Image (spheres, coloured by chain):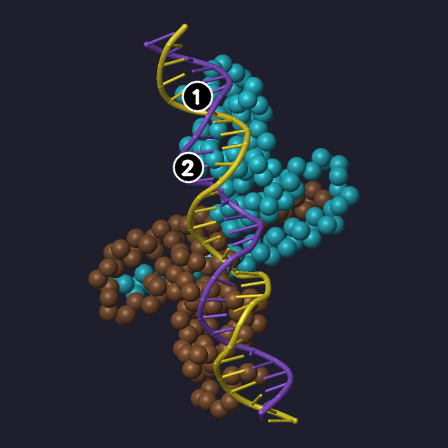
Chain colours: A cyan, B brown, C purple, D yellow
DNA sequence: CCTTACCTTTACGCAAACGTAAACTTGGTA
DNA sequence: TACCAAGTTTACGTTTGCGTAAAGGTAAGG
């Protein structure tokens, strides 16, 4: 076990390779996401310590990647979640962003339905 | 109108810029897909002539792109559609491929549902 | 024949997203 | 205390997916 000595449960901590292994990526990738300001773990000395919250961020990043977003786009989206709870001044701008995002996702969902049907037909053709 | 003189209807032909305009991409991209063996239009002299079938291929390519596949992956998928109607010898191998493809798509669909819900919540937060 | 609009190939350029090697620090274990 | 696995930074290399000239061929109209 790594990074688990004696701390309040549910406030888990992770090393970079903990997360790398869990999500099947390299440490290099995770550091790269940090370079690109997508995640910013605590430092204990020089070592990176990832919180449960950081882990969730990483999940969001990977989900975004699976959906074909660029890291820059993913950062935009993630930043939406981190509104200081009071800064709704730019709400209108954000709504537009969200709208666009949703349109793209709905298109993707259509694309997926299409492909699934076509794969199904292909499979039947192969009997 | 371009590339439309007097030919049997439903056997339409398209120039490269016809398709580029229709799908909102550049001719350069289409030629690039050809370089990568994703599409292979007829040549009339030196000019490319795209059939209705080619058009469909291009649609498949773009759909694949929207889904985040690489051109190489898209070629694999497209090649599945072009089985010489008799070569089901490797059917088993193909079924595996299809299975994997479907799993990835189902995962993506989940991802999209996730994101759509979260975007919905975000939007409500901004009232 | 000349212009104009569109097509062609060739080839170098570039940003994104890491891979990879080098060279060093750190913290737990023998 | 000496060691070793795992962490760190720095920096250059690689692949993918086109962009973007450069330099010219082609087809139709005037």
Q: Residues within 10 Å of mark 2 (few under 14, many from 20)?
A: few
For the point 39% across and 65% down, the residue is B37
Please tell me the numbered disc located at residue A24. 2
Q: Position of residue D8 (x, y in %)?
A: 52, 26
Q: Nearer the viewer, residue C24 or B79?
A: C24
Asked if badge 1 and badge 2 are on a common chain, one would say yes
- Residue lying furthest left: B89
Helix, strand or loop at label 1? It is: loop
For the point 49% across and 58% down, the residue is B65
Residue indicated by mark 1: A2
For the point 60% across and 57% down, the residue is A103
Sequence-first tag of 1 and 2: 1
Helix, strand or loop at label 2? It is: loop
Q: Quadrant of residue A57?
A: top right
Q: Position of residue B116 (x, y in %)?
A: 58, 49
Check the residue under mark 2 and report the chain it is in: A
Q: Position of residue D13 (x, y in %)?
A: 44, 44
Up/down of B105 relative to A21, above or below: below
For the point 56% across and 31% down, the residue is A54
A46 relative to D30 in the view: left or right: left
Q: CA distance from mark 1 to mark 2?
A: 17 Å
Q: Which quadrant of the figure contains the N terminus of chain A?
A: top left
Up/down of A9 relative to B102, above or below: above
- Residue lying furthest right: A89
Query: Quick check: can you spot residue B113?
Result: no
Q: Which quadrant of the figure contains the C terminus of chain A?
A: bottom left
């Amino acid at each position: 076990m790594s990074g688990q000595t004696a701390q309040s449960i549910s406030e888990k901590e992770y090393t970079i390779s903990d997360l790398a292994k869990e999500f099947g990526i390299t440490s290099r990738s995770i550091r790269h996401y940090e370079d690109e300001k997508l995640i910013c773990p605590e430092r204990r000395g020089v070592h990176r310590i990832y919180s449960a919250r950081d882990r969730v961020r990483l999940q969001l990043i990977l989900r975004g990647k699976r959906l074909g977003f660029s890291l820059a786009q993913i950062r935009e989206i993630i930043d939406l979640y981190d509104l200081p709870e009071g800064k709704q001044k730019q709400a209108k701008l954000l709504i537009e962003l969200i709208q666009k995002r949703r349109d793209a996702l709905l298109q993707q969902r259509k694309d997926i339905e299409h492909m699934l049907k076509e794969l199904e037909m292909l499979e039947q053709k192969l009997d």
